[in-house]
Image (cartoon, rainbow, N blue to C red):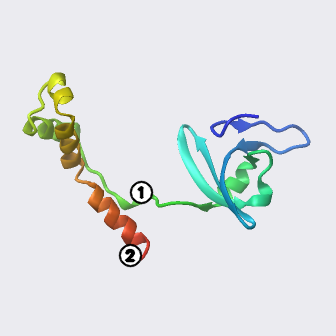
Amino acid sequence: MGNATEPLMGNAKEPLMHAINLIKTDGQAALVEWAEGGIPHRRIVPAAAIFDNACPPEVLDEGIPYGLAWSDLVELSASATALEENLHKAGIWTGADLLANVKAAYGALQATYGVDLAHLIKLANDQRGGK
């Protein structure tokens, strides 16, 4: 059997199966995770469709997506030039400067991308009903 990042090949009697990690089950539903091209995916699928930590790809495709689609919620408009400007404003001009002040480099990244944890928390709260 493969791991959760590679498909399992079927034979003439079995359909192609994809290796998955079973996260949890709840009644007839199962939350599964797998990776394609190094990108993790999670879906809720029928528990009956899982065999030996594998699931048919079409079941994965038809499953209910799990989690927030962060890329749909956050808009980034950064450039390498903007990052350079923010690094310089933070006093980071050399590799040694960066290694000596990683916290300032992180701040420069935040300034460049304009996204911080407070914004992500607000998005998460908005998605769950403002709680």
Q: Position of residue 82 (x, y in %)?
A: 17, 41
- Can you see residue 91? yes
Gap between marks 1 and 2 measured at Cα? 18 Å
Instruction: Return the residue at label 1.
Output: 70
* Picture residue at 37% right of the left edge, 70% below the top: 125
Residue at 42% x, 70% y is 127
Which badge, 1 or 2, comes first in the chain's sequence?
A: 1
Q: Residue furthest right?
A: 13
Dot 1 and dot 2 residues touching (CB under 8 Å): no
Q: How many marks?
A: 2
Q: Residue at x 80, y 49 (%)?
A: 51
Instruction: Give x and y (percent) for residue 90.
Output: 10, 38
At which x and y percent is residue 78?
A: 24, 46
State the SS at label 1. Answer: helix
The front one of 22 and 44 is: 22
Q: Position of residue 97 (x, y in %)?
A: 14, 27
Q: Which quadrant of the rendered structure holds the N terminus?
A: top right
SS for callout 2: loop
Q: What residue type is disc 2 on?
A: Lys
Q: Residue at 75% across / 37% down in the picture?
A: 8
Judge left or right: residue 67 versus residue 85: right
Identity of the amino acid at label 1?
Trp
Q: Which of these two is toward me, 58 or 123? A: 123
Q: Which residue is mark 2?
A: 131
Residue 47 has which mark? none
Q: Residues within 10 Å of mark 2 (few under 14, many from 20)?
A: few
| Up-down relation of residue 122 to residue 1 (above or below) | below
Q: Quadrant of residue 120?
A: bottom left
